[in-house]
Image: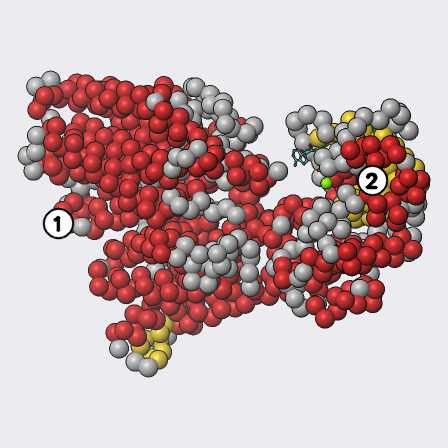
Amino acid sequence: MLELRGVAGGYGGPQVLRGVTLRVAAGEFVALIGPNGAGKSTVLKAVAGVLPRVEGEIALEGRPVQGLSPRALLALGVVYLPQGRNVFPSLTVLEHLELMRDLAPHALSPEAVLERFPALRPLLGRRAGLLSGGQQQLLCLARAALASPRLLLVDEPSLGLAPRVVEDVFAALADLRGRGVSILLVEQNARRALAAADRAYVLELGRTRLEGRGRELLEDPRVAQLYLGAPVSASAP
Amino acid sequence: MIALQILVYGLVTGANYALVAVGYTLVYGILKFINFTHGDVAMVGSFLALTAIGAMGLGLPAAVGVAVVGCAILGMAIERVAYRPLRRAGRLTPLLTAIGVSLLLENLVQLVFGAAIRTFSPPPYLAGTVVVAGAYVTGVQIAIFAATAVAVAVLAWLIGRTALGRQIRATADNFDLAVAMGVPTDRAILAVFALGSALAGLAGVLFGMETTVTPTMGISLGISAFAAVVLGGIGSVPGAVVGALVLGVAENVGAWFLGGSWSDGIGVLVLALTLLVRPEGLLGRRDPGAVKL
Amino acid sequence: MIADAVVLMSVYAILTLALNLSLGMAGLFNLGLAGFFAIGAYGTGLLAIAGWPFPAVLAADLVLGAAAGLLLAFPSLRLRGDYLAIVALGFGQLTETVLNSWDGLTGGANGLDNIPAPGAFAHVSGPVGAAVFALALLAVAVAVTEGLRRSPYGQLLGAVRDDEVLVQALGKSPHTAKVTALMLSGALSALGGAAYAYAISYVDPGLADFQTSVYVFLALLFGGMGSTWGSVVGGAGLVAVMEALQLVNLPTSVTGPAQEAFFALSLILLTLWRPQGVVAPAGAGRRAGAALPATAAEVAEDA
Ligand SMILES: Nc1ncnc2c1ncn2[C@@H]1O[C@H](COP(=O)(O)OP(=O)(O)O)[C@@H](O)[C@H]1O
Ligand SMILES: [Mg+2]
């Protein structure tokens, strides 16, 4: 589905990414973890078409997509959820769904999405700025689901949420995966991400350093070392 | 009765300002930027209508069409040429191109039409006068109220109820997120300039029927309309309308007591006073910016 | 002819220096410049006609300009920069309205005529005396602005322009710095008005026109934001081009608007294509492609 090979890039200053190589197979749920500031968000931005400078190869189903705008990527079925509260404060919940419906080529109806996110139904007329953090994040996922994406890029969806809401978020991601959506998830909360993902990569200082099945990485001492900032002797995969 | 008559004139002036004010507030909502050329776009609308009626012999409805479409195109051209290349250059740099465009428009119009003061006569079906509670209201004035009400209602529907309106509000709320989500933000911004400028064009025509037009009228018209926007609360469409009506009445009351030549100054004073006393305006929130309806 | 041009060159150079102080050094978009200029010119005219001696007129004029700057600072400086721009524009328009409408004081649309030349320069014959006088005031303006630019106060203004929050963190008041910059800019513009009124001996409300302000913005952008030398060359160069355009043999109903359109277009094109200026290109604090520095807050917002 998605393949990055030797991707480098940044914001105009020093390079933030210095060699990112990773793969997301069709229908696969891949996590990208790593210490704060490693460049995880920047990797997603590079794929999503919002990073000012990108070098290297980014391919979607074998087709090069670097330099495409978020709009062009949406037409190819790529949906990107940036880090943070990604709602428009003055638009209502329903308007968020309608906004995506008008943009995505294979969009579902708001009604169909509300079946899967019943918690949003009583909030349809409320402005998103007035929702709780958890409700906002659910709205983001519902909006993404409405686009019926082929690939979902999602950045720290559990950040700042109560544990119970974090479970809702991961349940929604699992549901999407169950429907055949490929997912590339960036998380600080490595334990939770590795438990949910099929496979994961560890990013350090702008390079992918480790790769493995979620459970394996969870027990790998080198992962703990990376999070403590110690250098890793093993070379990148 | 004189008070009521002044009120009528004030509301007519205010209705006209409202059409211009809405354009400022829309552009401010989406770009957080004061579009200094806006008053001059309305001025061009007046002269387009003047040409349509005078030189081309068209009727008033067709002249309105010419002014509205012409100004919409002009507004989009200004955005594309003078503002878009500077979108990441900070807030003040586009003001330089803006004042350049203002002066350019004034003088191009002057080269074509000369500097003389112009009026255009209303069509016969608007020539009558009715008496409402002792105050005279002309057909033209009724047409101005009606046109303003319809135009603002159509705008409110466009912004509040359509796909384009959602995209405009999303872009105004959070530009970067709108881009990341695939909202066609450039198109939304162009649409805002087109809508605001179309209403300014309509205002230009109505203005021309009620008072006189000159190539230099854009600046004072722009300042008054902007004062109305700030008075009502910048970024808010209802605020712009309310502010415009209040300012229109204030100007006419002031002109009654001080003499007509002072009415231009009242907009400036209202602007300064509002900024001193209540910078968020009558209907504004503490954090101005979002387009509200 | 040449002497007249020298007078106008000096006046525009002084005005450009005044704008450089507010916009170039402190980042304040003082679009009411023509208003200050007209206030200075009328103040000079009225007091000189009333028989005040030259030093008293000049002192009163500077105070008047500074007071006008203070008046403008009140409603606008605590708000974002573009609010100052539009309030200042309104201030210029209001000045023109007052000059036109307060017939009893200002002579209305006819303006003030026969303003007596200052004593010290009266014995130098006519136009040459006027030119020497205007140049002398320009020299004063250059000395003052260059002195300010190099002083700690000048550096404070630069800091306010680039990063207001930092200035606050250092325990200085950006607000005081901005108010004083606007007052100084007002006083300098009034000095330009004094040069004009004394040297030309006639003033009218048109001095407060928006177009004058735009011309000075063009001169400053051409000269290069922040540069004293660039401002002088920019202001004088602008007048040189105006004079050259006068030589084209066309009716004034065409040359007037054509000249304004030409300068307006120049301002647009310079801003888009040569934002750093021509004479003394500006460097520091500016992002690529921007004529004016963005504040640190704006840079952070865009990131
Ligand atoms: N908008 C930006 N402009 C400049 N540098 C940035 C920007 N965003 C992030 N960076 C830098 O890129 C590096 C990686 O950031 P990021 O990708 O957000 O890390 P992570 O998501 O892994 O915590 C950091 O050093 C950060 O300072
Ligand atoms: Mg991150």
Q: Position of residue C211 (x, y in %)?
A: 35, 38
Q: Which residue appears at 34% of the width and 66% of the height?
A: B249
Q: Position of residue A32 (x, y in %)?
A: 83, 40
Q: Position of residue C253 (x, y in %)?
A: 32, 38
Q: Position of residue B150 (x, y in %)?
A: 52, 68
Q: Which residue appears at 43% of the width and 19% of the height?
A: C280
User: In the rendered image, which residue does mark 2 sit on?
Assistant: A32
Q: Which residue appears at 31% of the width and 44% of the height?
A: C72
What mark, if any, has residue C272 been given in the picture?
A: none
Circle 1 chain: C
Q: Quadrant of ligand 2?
A: top right
Q: Nearer the viewer, residue B87 or C251?
A: B87
Give the residue type that dot 1 points to: Gly
Disc 2 versus disc 1: distance between alpha carbons?
78 Å
User: In the rendered image, which residue does mark 1 sit on?
Assistant: C104
- Check disc 2 and report its element: helix, strand or loop: strand
Give the answer, above or below, for where C145 lies relative to B242: above
Give the residue type that dot 2 points to: Leu
Question: Would residue A186 be found to the left or right of residue A23 on screen?
Answer: left
Question: Which corner quadrant of the image does residue C278 belong to?
Answer: top left
Could you tell me if residue B234 is visible in this image? yes
Image quadrant containing the C terminus of chain B? bottom right
Q: Which residue appears at 18% of the width and 50% of the height?
A: C102
- Check disc 1 and report its element: helix, strand or loop: helix
Tell me the crowding category of disc 1: few under 14, some 14 to 19, or many 20 or more residues within 10 angstroms, Cα based.
few
Q: Is mark 1 within 8 Å of ligand 1?
A: no
Give the answer, above or below, for where C49 lies relative to B126: above
